[in-house]
Image (cartoon, rainbow, N blue to C red):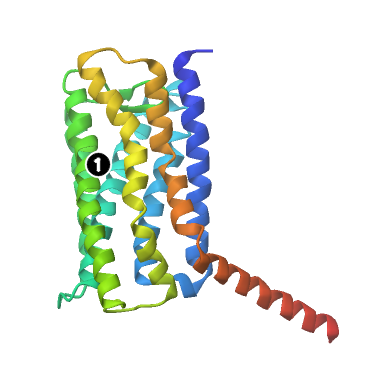
Amino acid sequence: MDNFYAIYIGIALAASFSIMGSLFILIIYFKYPNLQCFAFRLVSYLTFFNFFESLSQIIPSYKISSNLCLVQSIFNQFFGLCNILWTGFICLILYFQVSKNSLNPKRYEKIFLFLTVLISFASIAILLTFSNFGYVGGNCWIEEVELGNYFRFIFFLIPAWAVIFFISIMYIKIIHTVRRESFLITEMDKAQDMVINKLKVYPIVMIIGFTPLTVYRILEIFIYPPLWLYAIGVAVYTFIGFMNAVVYGMNESVKDEIFKKYSEEDVSISLEDRG
């Protein structure tokens, strides 16, 4: 088996889990109105970005056509950077919400969402200008030609680690504020409390997801690192969507809401049988 084909298999498997995890979160969000709090809505945007990035990675575009490879490269860059930027903006919005700031955090939801999309589109425009998209082994993204390695750091890895550092600091502030005040300034309910509690895990998810790939890219500057490290790095990064689903979906609020929903359906069916 070709080594890069084996890498593609690993990417496709990880992407499949992330797609299923993302679909689970989106279905939960739209199916259960009680979970549609402000904080969970912010997470649903992140899940949307995760879903389409994972969906694009599962297509073996390099074996089909160069045009499809270009489309996959654009999707990987656009939705990947959207994931990174929106994660930071979620943190900032929620910090506004739990702090005593007089600003209404909901005012910034659409602004930050617009900035996320705009900056990601700008990265696409710059990369297309320098023709830096193509097959990179396993799937398509920023090629290793001329400025390719620099662009990977500028438009992906550096923003990722900047956001990891930023959200780590901000989430500490958020959790400290919530514990000190024992309530959120607005919209405090069980579902929102769940999201806030889960936020402390998200920096860990990002660190796990980005560390192997970052190590590989740094080593690549000095030596030719082993291919297995690249395979692990890409697969672990692609798995972030599934890890998000575990963090935000496997919790008591979601379980309680699902149990309550199906309990009501069981009671309804039982009453119909008696009638």
How far across and how far down the image is residue 173, in percent? 21, 62
Residue to which mark 1 is pinned:
160
Q: Position of residue 231 (x, y in %)?
A: 42, 24
Residue 94 is at least partly visible in this image? no
Residue 231 horizontal side relative to residue 157, left or right:
right
Residue at coordinates 24% horizontally, 57% vertically from top-left? 89
Three-letter code, disc 1? Ala
Residue 3 in the image, given as x and y percentages of width and height:
46, 14
Mark yes or no: residue 96 visible: yes
Residue count near mark 1 (Cα–Cα under 10 Å), binned few <14, some 14–19, many ≥20: many
Is 170 rendered above or below residue 39? above
Q: Quadrant of residue 80?
A: top left
31 or 100, nearer to the observer = 100
Residue furthest toward the front?
180
**SS category of the residue bearing label 1:** helix
The answer to which quarter of the image holds residue 160 is: top left
Residue at the extreme right of the image, as rendered: 274
Between residue 77 and residue 164, name the one nearer to us. 164
The answer to whether residue 170 is above or below residue 2 is: below
Q: Residue at x 23, y 30 (%)?
A: 152
Farthest bottom residue in view: 275
Question: Relative to the observer, which residue lies in front, 118 or 253?
Answer: 253
In-image side of 186 versus 258 (left or right):
left
Q: Look at 34% across and 58% down and name the residue there.
A: 199
**Which quarter of the rendering shows the C terminus?**
bottom right
